[in-house]
Amino acid sequence: MVDVILGMQWGDEGKGKIVDYFAPRYDIIARFQGGPNAGHTLYVNGKKIVLHQIPSGIFHQNTINIIGNGVVLDPVTLKRECDAVAAFGIDVKKNLFISERTNIIVPTHRALDKASEMQKGDSKIGSTLKGIGPAYMDKTGRNALRVGDVLQKNFTTEYIRLRLKHQKLLDNFHFVEDIGAWEEEFFEALEFLKTLNVVNGEYFIHEKIRDGKKVLAEGAQGSMLDIDFGTFPFVTSSNTISAGVCTGLGVSPRMIGEVMGVTKAYCTRVGGGPFPTELENETGELIRKTGSEFGATTGRPRRCGWIDLVALKYAAMLNGVTQMIMTKADVLDGFSDLEMCTAYKINGRETKELPYQMNGITIEPVLKNFAGWNTPTVHCREAAQLPEKMKTYISFINEYVGAPVKVVSNGPEREQIVHL
């Protein structure tokens, strides 16, 4: 069976720590979608490291880590990550495997991403400018280069073909930056990529499952950024929900077991797009500072707000979530008063359904007040140690969403975990 851990909000839910925590229970950790815009932050031996493409199980020596075909891979970022991981004494050539069907981000994808975003002016979607959108466009347009192509003799010819195609588009954007340094770094990274374990991903993972190995699929970004079901057009370019596991790894729906959805105790969002519970006031700033809410990839300050149960229930429905994991609960330790969004008011009418189009309309969150626990919880390791007011807060979420919070993360370290 394949269990799944994914985000239920707009990403940045703290999935990296959660995957790292659960990794010892699994034989294989597999990334099934997304690109290097995903920043999964881990703390290893007290040191912080951010992973962008390598699965978060890499620090467990006996765990196989797979980058699946649903990912778009930047070889340059991958090499940097591998170097950073190696500094911790981890041999990535031993337990990191890459599907040969995985699409590659080339330098001109990054150029196209930047040129396109610059042209949008005030309509920018907040792209991380990593080339992910253009890479997925080439995938659906059947123009992409894949990891397996790197091992072929005609790769350079195919790369030039794609580069010329992109150059015509860049000329239309009047993009004149020199990307020669990017290309030099890219081809150096490709030589490193050739030394890694490139496998026929779908056969590889099925063989392991037949051998009784347990697989954990690791999602990037969050459900509200899904290309089909998120807050379009302010979304990512892949399917971030559990359905993406099947297409991103080559496994059937019958193989999906537990679906663990990760949510913060509040909400954050990076970049543009609708955010009904956003707090553009002192409370929002206090959440940002207390939670160190700055993008792991870009460093951009995250927009902060109260937890949005309308969106959370929507995400649970789409993913078939069997249990939830609440992170950063400790960030709310110092608050005497808390609120949750239980409905949206649109044009004077209340609804508990996510509208088809959230952009360009006014959504007023209907808020329910809760008493904050206003006491430190970072030391708690047992459910009995948690404040009763925190338990009340969690119980309401369980009832509203229809899926139980089974785990609470109350700090960045591995041991700061409470099972309910």
Image (spheres, rainbow, N blue to C red):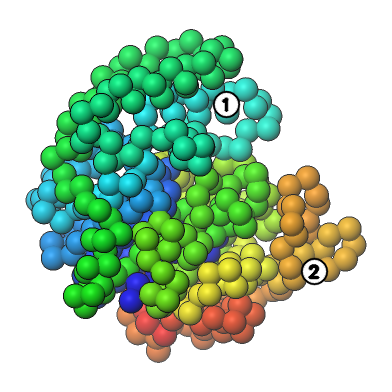
Residue carrying label 2? 351
As drawn, the residue found furthest toward the right would be: 348
Instruction: Check disc 1 and give the amino acid type.
Output: Ser
Whether residue 92 sits left or right of residue 322 in the image: it is left
**What secondary structure is marked by label 2?**
strand
- Expressed as whole percent of the image width and height from the top left, the position of residue 410 reads 39, 70
Q: Earlier in the sequence, mark 1 or mark 2?
A: 1
Q: Residue at the spot x=81%, y=51% of the render?
A: 362
Label 1 to label 2: alpha-carbon separation: 36 Å
Viewer-nearest residue: 323 or 385: 323
Question: Would you call the spot at circle 2 few (<14 residues within 10 Å), some (14-19), or many (20 or more)?
Answer: some
Whether residue 85 sits left or right of residue 71 in the image: it is left
Q: Is residue 168 above or below residue 340?
A: above
Instruction: Check disc 2 and give the amino acid type.
Output: Thr
Q: Residue at the spot x=50%, y=25% of the render?
A: 112
Quarter residue 286 falls in: bottom right
**What secondary structure is marked by label 1?**
helix
Question: Would you call the spot at circle 1 few (<14 residues within 10 Å), some (14-19), or many (20 or more)?
Answer: some
As drawn, the residue found furthest toward the bottom would be: 384
Whether residue 270 sits left or right of residue 341 in the image: it is left
Q: On residue 116, which mark appears?
A: 1
Viewer-nearest residue: 354 or 291: 354
